[in-house]
Image (tube, rainbow, N blue to C red):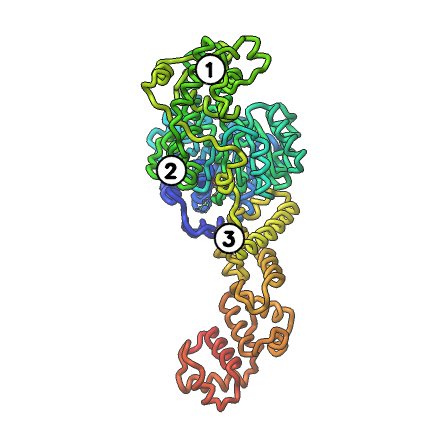
Amino acid sequence: MASDKKEALKKYFGYDSFREHQAEIIDTVMRGNDCFVLMPTGGGKSICFQIPAILKEGLTVVISPLIALMKDQVEALTGNGVPAAFLNSTLSASEQDQIIRRAQTGDLKLLYIAPERLFSGNTFELLKEWNVSFFAIDESHCISSWGHDFRPEYRLLSSLKIRFPQVPVIALTATADRVTRRDILKQLKIEGAQTFLTSFDRPNLSLSVLPGRKRLQQIQDFINKRQNQSGIIYCLSRKSTESVAGSLKNAGLKAEYYHAGLPADKRSKVQEAFLRDDLQIIVATIAFGMGIDKSNVRWVIHYNLPSNVESFYQEIGRAGRDGLPSDTVLFYSYMDIMTRQDMINNSDQSSEQKELLHAKLNRMKQYAETDICRRRVLLNYFNDSFDRDCGNCDVCKNPRSRFDATVLAQKALSGIARTDQKVAMGMLVDILRGSKNRNVLQHGYERLPTFGVGSELKGEEWTEYIGQLLNSGAMDIAYDEAHSFKLNAVSRQILKGERKVELVKFIPLNERKAREEELAPREKPKKEIIRDALFDRLRTLRKQLADSLGVPPYVVFSDATISEMAQQKPVSEMQMKSISGVGAEKFRRYGETFINEILDFARENFKPGTRAVAGMTFIETLNLFKSGSSIQSIAEQRGLSTTTVISHLIKLEEEGHELDLESLVDEQTYQTIIKAAEEIQVRKNDPLKPLFELLNEKFDYGQIRLALAILEKKGGFF
Ligand code: ADP
Ligand code: ZN
């Protein structure tokens, strides 16, 4: 195994540097101190305990609540050459015995266990025998009833410190809130733990809010611009997941729905297909996602407004875990707020609890309606100081134009006043626009002075503006009176002309070009098109390998890794290992296969002699040489001089390829050249001309170089 953390990072994970706090956390665990880690989803928590587990003596026990996640993590570790296993109820008794034996013999570095398994049978007695280096408690917020995902079985972990007072604990979570945080430490009895709080910012996630009109059409446009990119659409109800998935399927897209009402086998089938890139789109309720480790989710859409910012952040956090640019879109309309408020009011919560839920919903609404950088709103919610504009949200990219809407507001408010505050959205819009439909006529509203005063605006414009007025507090709404609008103090000020109103300009969908372009990938330069074509090739290869091994594609290589390959086009071992995510084990397993794919691609797409692929020309020489061609024949086949071919072989040998250079020059030639070189004391990198002349031009430069290279390899004089 590796001896230090940096070396382990490269060898087992293929990464060159640590992210924020990772190195300090690893040091803390190595010193044997308890520690608590708060990091957003995708921040890189796993490495914080996996590297100490590799470096420390003994076995690290990882407590994890989710069976699917355990399996993924163990697969990923094994794929990186780290001996790991899991124990849970999905395994047969004999499989469990086998793993216990491996732990006993010290063959394992990490063992993942579900909390209930830890407390059943004789596990504790076993652990005492096993020399446990430390406990890692993943998703540790599950221990607190204040968290959003309390699991009673996690409470059992409270006795861990009592039973194993000497064994350090590292607790990890992505849940931010302060109360939960304190409770975790208290429950685990690690109040003295060193705490690491990482910024919640995920700069690779773009943030956009789109008006909640014609959502399906907008979604289809969005997806059509993202072929082959995996994504999740979150809906409020089970029924809408089914109908949205149905419409997308009808439009020829690969979509399936997922919710808690589905039979377990159907759910795992859908999930599995998604993980394996066989299914592009999952339309789901919030039941989907917890424990989904898929790192190449490229976008997340919220079809409906989530109930609070924590859930929203967690859900969009499932995109772009590999760090590549990913998009998030929230659809928002005033009706979504109504629906959510109704849900809270009609729930059987205490009034105190309802108040809390309303307050949380309100913060979500503020995010949806903000005119300042959305990332600022989000991060400030988590008390993450972020005091600049991010440049990667729709507000930053496309500042809103506002206009004086005082007269418009007065029209709407007087419509409310004239109808005795009994009308809701639909009717108010009809009155303002002067629609003589049956409902309007029934109430005699066509005789009101306000009837038709707003006919210059379309229905959808009025709906949007009235929604904005409501959200900015220009009036109230009575949930218990069929959502009818009510005037308040602000409304009266506006009606009397004592208060000005500004609203954000409505943009019809078909004119939303600017915003759509911002969501759509730009027109690509040729270089990028080629890179993308190679990316597709490598992705297809990855998929084939993954299927044959029965693992999800990102377990082979992440999107970030193959994207870097497509960019750098590595064709030698050294180049390949310098790609982020290609560790020693990954290289051993897949390195050559990927190099060959890149070479095939390069041969098909580039004219010989171009420098599109650094090192490609060397590899061509190498392949011919390996297949038994002589230097002369390689030179002829490739249209190069023999000297060039020889210099290729020397370079390849220096790079670590096993080539028998000595077989290329006969002993007598070698001795003659070396003797002459000694005579005039040639040093490395000296010009070779004097030597060439001293030898009476009897040997060509290729032979001279070769002899010197062999000499150097033998530890010769220079
Ligand atoms: P979390 O558990 O915090 O959600 P993970 O541990 O799954 O996050 O890490 C998310 C992704 O980031 C993984 O693909 C992981 O391999 C990658 N990653 C972690 N640390 C680094 C690093 N130092 N350099 C590059 N990638 C990293
Ligand atoms: Zn921004």
Q: Which numbered dot is residue 198? A: 2
User: Distance from label 3 to label 1 (Cα)?
Assistant: 63 Å
Please state which of residues 231 and 442 is positioned toward the viewer in this rendering: 442
* 1 or 2: mark nearer the eye: 1
Amino acid type, residue under disc 3 in the picture: Glu
Looking at the picture, how far across and down is residue 415, in whole percent? 45, 15
Q: Which numbered dot is residue 107? A: none
Decide: few, some or many residues near mark 1? Use Cα within 10 Å; few <14, some 14-19, many ≥20: many
Kindly indicate the quadrant of the structure image that contains residue 624. bottom right
Q: Earlier in the sequence, mark 1 or mark 2?
A: 2
Q: Which residue is mark 3?
A: 564
Residues tagged 3 and 1 counted as in contact (Cβ below 8 A):
no
Residues tagged 3 and 2 counted as in contact (Cβ below 8 A):
no
Amino acid type, residue under disc 2 in the picture: Thr
Q: Residue at x 36, y 27 (%)?
A: 178
The residue tagged with tag 2: helix, strand or loop?
loop
Q: Earlier in the sequence, mark 3 or mark 1?
A: 1
Please state which of residues 83 and 367 is positioned toward the viewer in this rendering: 367
644 versus 438 height, above or below: below
Q: How many marks?
A: 3
Decide: few, some or many residues near mark 3? Use Cα within 10 Å; few <14, some 14-19, many ≥20: some
Q: Which residue is mark 1?
A: 450
Looking at the picture, how far across and down is residue 50, in whole percent? 46, 42
* 3 or 1: mark nearer the eye: 1
The residue tagged with tag 3: helix, strand or loop?
helix
- Residue 369 visible in the current orientation: yes
544 versus 669 height, above or below: above
335 versus 484 height, above or below: below
Q: Residue at x 36, y 43 (%)?
A: 24
Amino acid type, residue under disc 1 in the picture: Thr
Looking at the picture, how far across and down is residue 354, in whole percent? 44, 15
